[in-house]
Amino acid sequence: MSAARSVKACRFALQRYAAGMTLSFLPPARGFLGLPPSAAFSASQAKSVLIPFGLEQSVSYEGGTAQGPQAIIDCSPQLELFDDELWREPHEAFKPMTAKPVKISASLPKALDQLEALVDDVLEAGKFPMIMGGEHSLTAGSIRPFAKRHQKLTIMHFDAHADLRDGYEGETYSHAAALRRCLDFPHVRLVSVGIRNISKSEIPFLEKNKKRITVFWAREKAEWTVAKIMKAIGSGPVYVTFDIDAFDSSLIPATGTPEPGGLFWDETMDILRATFTQKNVVGADVVELSPRPGLHACNFLAAKLVFKMLAYQFCLSRHAS
């Protein structure tokens, strides 16, 4: 490492320390899955770290994403630990630890810096980061440590919205610009699945960047195949970002902008299973759950989604044990 890079790394470490960004964890019984002492794992044994990050600063319709991570954690103990598809208890492979929630900065750029530091700590510890949001703008922060580590990176993006605006309502880092900000890194590519909303202002950027962006439009779902999607992803590291409004609004009304015409569970699992099995997935997030009173099924679906993604990563991929 050069002297300049060494100084920069030390400065970044000091900034993280000053901001209280060193990792600390919830007791397993209070974390994801609510594991009892007999089934829990220590931080050193953990293979995955779940980062609750209830960011809610640029929502433009219904709010509630600040409560999303805790809603996922609260209902996760109701998940059955045995998975009939994998015929095992996957948590024994992905060995989860849940980071303590941090106080999120009121400044959106600083909040993204916070998340960047947390994800960086998880990667430095050799663990797999799973971020539970929180609005989608957080991906512009969580992607940075991966973009710095990999010479090429593909984002596998599940969403109802393209999120390619160059800012929205005066906010450069808006949730509506989440993937545009990720593509500020020139070596990052994007494969979007389930898109059924895009604004006129996003079209020039999309058309100019056709070599970097592949969109599987929801209206063309009958023409998709898993093989086509896998081919579009290509080789190299993959980061999965999953906005739950990718699901049809009949499954997920508890999100800021629920949209009809979306994905359903089984077809989504087919795509995720192939992605985690065939590709080198290096991190993931699940965002935009906005819990609603009485709609417990939405919280449960989000928790199950997190569970299945980790299960596929550690039971079917190159990490499988």
Image (cartoon, rainbow, N blue to C red):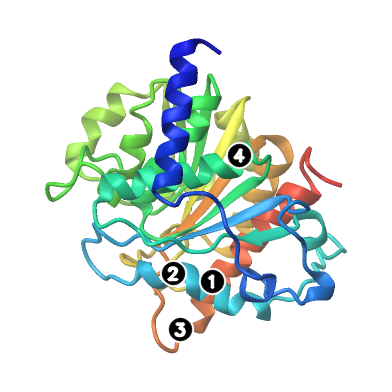
Density class for disc 4 (Cα within 10 Å; few <14, some 14-19, many ≥20) is some
The numbered mark, 4 or 3, whose residue comes first in the sequence reads 4
The reply to whether dot 4 and dot 3 touch (C-beta < 8 Å) is no
Q: Separation of disc 4 and disc 3 at Cα? A: 34 Å
The reply to whether dot 3 and dot 2 touch (C-beta < 8 Å) is no
> Does 254 sit above or below residue 121?
below
- Labels 4, 3: front one: 4
* SS type, badge 3: loop
Q: Amino acid at mark 4?
A: Leu
Q: Separation of disc 1 and disc 3 at Cα? A: 13 Å
The dot on residue 72 is: 1
Q: Which residue is mark 4?
A: 123
The dot on residue 68 is: 2
Q: Which residue is mark 3?
A: 295
The numbered mark, 3 or 2, whose residue comes first in the sequence reads 2
The numbered mark, 2 or 4, whose residue comes first in the sequence reads 2
The reply to whether dot 1 and dot 2 touch (C-beta < 8 Å) is yes
* SS type, badge 4: helix
Q: Amino acid at mark 3?
A: Leu
- Labels 3, 2: front one: 2
Q: Amino acid at mark 1?
A: Ile
> Does 320 sit above or below residue 95?
above
Q: Separation of disc 2 and disc 4 at Cα? A: 23 Å
Q: Is residue 90 left or right of residue 105?
A: right
